[in-house]
Image (cartoon, rainbow, N blue to C red):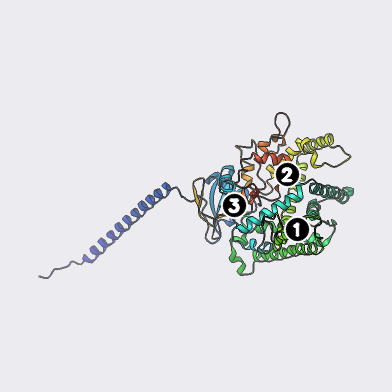
Amino acid sequence: MATSLSADSPQQLSSLSTQQTTLLLLFSVLAAVHLGQWLLRQWQRKPWSSPPGPFPWPLIGNAAAVGQASHLYFARLARRYGDVFQIRLGSCPVVVLNGESAIHQALVQQGSIFADRPPFASFRVVSGGRSLAFGHYSEHWKTQRRSAYSTMRAFSTRHPRSRGLLEGHALAEARELVAVLVRRCAGGAFLDPTQPVIVAVANVMSAVCFGCRYNHDDAEFLELLSHNEEFGRTVGAGSLVDVLPWLQLFPNPVRTTFRKFEQLNRNFSNFVLDKFLRHHESLVPGAAPRDMTDAFILSAEKKASGAPGDDSSGLDLEDVPATITDIFGASQDTLSTALLWLLILFTRYPDVQARVQAELDQVVGRDRLPCMSDQPNLPYVMAFLYESMRFSSFLPVTIPHATTANTFVLGYYIPKNTVVFVNQWSVNHDPAKWPNPEGFDPTRFLDKDGFINKALASSVMIFSVGKRRCIGWHTKMSSHFLEAERGSLFSDSTDPQEILLL
């Protein structure tokens, strides 16, 4: 028997199909939400959860938000996400470490794991890829750095003769700097001290490294030193040329800046190479080293000859120019920045300036310049220097690190080859350690008897810690700091010779 269909049957069937589809979609959404919640709970139970962080935008990640004051941006994120968090710069995930505990756990307790450098384009340019500061962590790198540290320390502070040479160069340049500043502001003229300070510091390092200095009006030397700030921006944390490498594929300001960076590195390397070749040709066998370049050449030649007593840990001769480039370039850049901060702070806090001058007048007098032996008798001057470093944190974020293995920091999983930024500023401005951290108060470093509080001084982080600590830290600070470091939270590296290079 045929079945008769009413006129509205197709509409009923169609309506039923729509209801079924809607219910199916609703159940699918509920199931997906339930599954997502279950997976989230399972992920949170695992000990290897990744660090939290802000939402990254497509293509650029968080690069637009970092800005020039990256340390302040990181500090704000740390208040929201904790001392270990993750951002994304372009397609590059970056873990940022803030605070004493996280940085100590990473750089000191796991020094070897956090000792590498990222494979950034700008890093490969410096010193033709042979740079200590920017080179990859390896057995060759460790040997190169141990030798550089030993030679540099022997020629700067370890022996009385070399210590006297360093002190003599510094005092002579201090006299010249004062004369230049007085001459250029004669008659009440406006004076920007930046260039004279940069030249003065570079001259001290030139005298130490090459045995010569330059006039403050030397055009070639001024041109060589004029790109310090540009160099720092290019290799610093969050440099666009490194985290957005596709910007090098077409004309734009970032590519132009990078090409200038390549040229200034060639100029700087050629300057040092010329000095090296002249020293190598004129070096008299058996003679005492005239400067640090001589000392490095002698160390390399001793290693090459297999002389008795050689432990084969010296530099290879081909590594000497790059090592000298690191020492000359990095030291004069950081020290000139520090000195400019001192001038700013003296101007901003005239009462502090007056107290520093009063202590100098009492201990040193006006008939001579201060010397290294005066340091123990100048507690307020040293307190001023410690507070200046803490307050300014003139190197707020270190050169980027990279991990050599999978690891954990404060319970968060960090994979091998992860780029790591270290926010030193967060340690120096932690309100839990420094009451009123945004206030400038040198007396915080003095104990009740008016002497330096060495334990507190050791808490200032400015030259990084761990295996990438700055190799010149011992020449940049006083004997007070050296003593304080021996008991510092940051000093328990497995190898005392390996707490170097920032």
Find disc 1 in the rendering and name its residue. 298
Element type at mark 2: loop
- Residue 459 rendering spot, x and y as whole percentages: 64, 40
Counting other residues with Cα less than 10 Å from the Cα at mark 3, is it few (<14), some (14-19), or many (20 or more)? Answer: many
Task: Determine if residue 127 is in view.
Answer: yes
- Residue 474 rendering spot, x and y as whole percentages: 71, 46
Element type at mark 3: strand
Quarter of the image for residue 232 reads bottom right
Find disc 2 in the rendering and name its residue. 477
Mark 2 vs mark 1, CA separation in Å: 27 Å
Counting other residues with Cα less than 10 Å from the Cα at mark 1, is it few (<14), some (14-19), or many (20 or more)? Answer: many
Find disc 3 in the rendering and name its residue. 421
Labels 2, 1: front one: 1
Labels 2, 3: front one: 2
Counting other residues with Cα less than 10 Å from the Cα at mark 2, is it few (<14), some (14-19), or many (20 or more)? Answer: few
Residue appearing at x 64%, y 69% in the figure: 251
- Residue 437 rendering spot, x and y as whole percentages: 65, 39
Residue 206 horizontal side relative to residue 494, left or right: right
Labels 3, 1: front one: 1
Mark 2 vs mark 3, CA separation in Å: 24 Å
